Amino acid sequence: MAGNKIDFSPDSYLEKLSQENKPELQFQAESREEWYLWRQKLKLKIAELLGGLPQSFRVTELKILEKSEFKTYSRIRIAYQVEGYLKIPAYLLIPDQNAEHSVSAAAAIEFLNNLKQ
């Protein structure tokens, strides 16, 4: 037995395991099409891990929190409640109808504000 070194370190085992492991959804896209396919697979995997997502939902409450007017658009901060339990803050951007390049409205869910609180 002399000269035989036994490695009892779980660190070396985990290091070897991580080097040999290739994550199923590792990002390797090199084009927009590859990115889109990867994104679809990732969304399906997340939904699977969450136990599935509802096929539809109903907004049960909507509140206007503030409204700001700018030169070419209005910004409305809203909060809406889904199915009576999930409250979601968002911004609704509405372009000025008289603007030279008027486009449709856009909504953006506000995640960063919740992280600050």
Image (spheres, rainbow, N blue to C red):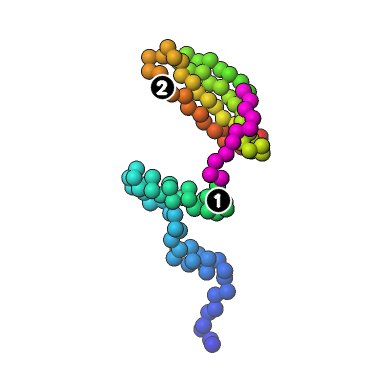
Residue under the point 58% across and 18% down? 67
Direction top: furthest residue? 98
Instruction: Measuring from the top left, give residue 7's x and y in whole percent.
Output: 54, 75
The x, y position of residue 84, in whole percent, is 66, 37
Considering depth in this image, is 86 or 66 the residue closer to the camera? 86
Residue type indicated by callout 1:
Gly
Pinpoint residue 109: horizontal percent, then vertical percent: 54, 33
Residue at horizontal 42%, vertical 12%? Answer: 98
Q: Quadrant of residue 97?
A: top left
- Quadrant the N terminus occupies: bottom right
Mark sitting on residue 39: none
Looking at the rendered structure, the secondary structure element under dot 1 is loop
Figure check: 19 above or below 112: below
Where residue 102 sits, quadrant-wise, is top left
Residue at the spot 38% in from the left edge and 18% down from the top edge: 101
> Closest to the observer: 90 or 4?
90
Q: Nearer the viewer, mark 1 or mark 2?
A: 1
Name the image quarter holding the C terminus: top right
Q: Nearer the viewer, residue 70 or 64?
A: 64
Q: Is residue 56 magenta?
A: yes
The crowding category of the residue bearing disc 2, from other C-alpha atoms within 10 Å (few below 14, some 14 to 19, many at least 20), is: few
Q: Is residue 78 left or right of residue 26?
A: right
**Amino acid at circle 2:** Val
Image-based side of 80 in relation to 4, left or right? right
Gap between marks 1 and 2, in whole Å? Answer: 34 Å
Q: Which residue is mark 1?
A: 52
Q: Is residue 30 above or below residue 21?
A: above
Q: Which x, y percent locates residue 47?
A: 52, 50
Q: Residue 103 got which mark? A: 2
